[in-house]
Image: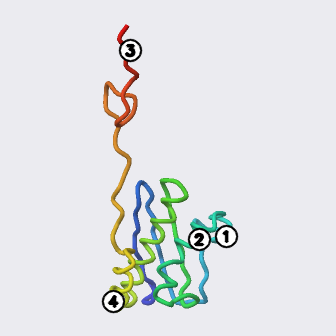
Amino acid sequence: MEDNVFYATGKRKCAIARVRMKPGEGKFEINKRALDEYFVNDVSKMVIKQPIELTETSGKYDIYVNVKGGGFSSQAGAIRHGIAKALLDIDSDFRGILKKAGLITRDSRIKERKKYGQRKARAKFQFSKR
């Protein structure tokens, strides 16, 4: 394997993103597709690029991501988390910047399970006296 390749795993809700970063010209590839092709929403693109812009490393690394599970929003959050963790492997001086922005901490909120005797996790069946 190459010495200049940095790996990290990011998670959010049910989405899991495996991120590989290596020195390059700033190419983004998500599930073998370009960033603009995979994410149509501009907010998702902004979320993904957030750790790179904060650390001022845009255009310095090629980023390859395999992401699965969850929706587009949680996949974007998982990719952001993975990129932030990979940047920590590249340079530990980024820790203060990324920690202050809240990008290192994993968002552990997941869907609550449905309980028996109820319609959903918290919603009950409609009550009728008769």
Find the distance from the CA under tag 1 to the CA under tag 3. 51 Å
Q: Are marks 4 and 1 in contact (CB under 8 Å)?
A: no
Expressed as whole percent of the image width and height from the top left, the position of residue 100 reads: 35, 81
Counting residues from the start of the chain, the first of labels 1 and 3 encountered is 1
Q: Give the residue at mark 3.
A: 128
Residue 1 coordinates in the image, percent (x, y): 44, 83
Work out whether mark 2 precedes mark 1 in sequence or the reverse, and give the earlier one.
Answer: 1
Question: Cα distance, mark 4 to mark 1?
Answer: 30 Å
Residue 127 in the figure: left or right of residue 61: left
- From the viewer's side, name the closer residue of 96 and 39: 96
Query: Which SS class for mark 1?
Result: helix
- Distance between the alpha carbons at the discs numbered 2 and 4: 25 Å
Q: Nearer the viewer, mark 3 or mark 2?
A: 3
Q: Nearer the viewer, mark 2 or mark 1?
A: 2
| Residue marked by disc 1 | 36
Give coordinates of residue 98: x percent, y percent.
38, 81
Q: How far apart are the two marked residues, 3 and 4, measured between alpha carbons?
A: 60 Å
The label shown at residue 92 is: 4
* Foreground of the two, 97 or 85: 97
Q: Is residue 31 left or right of residue 54?
A: right
**Residue at the image point whose x is 47% and y is 72% from the top:** 80
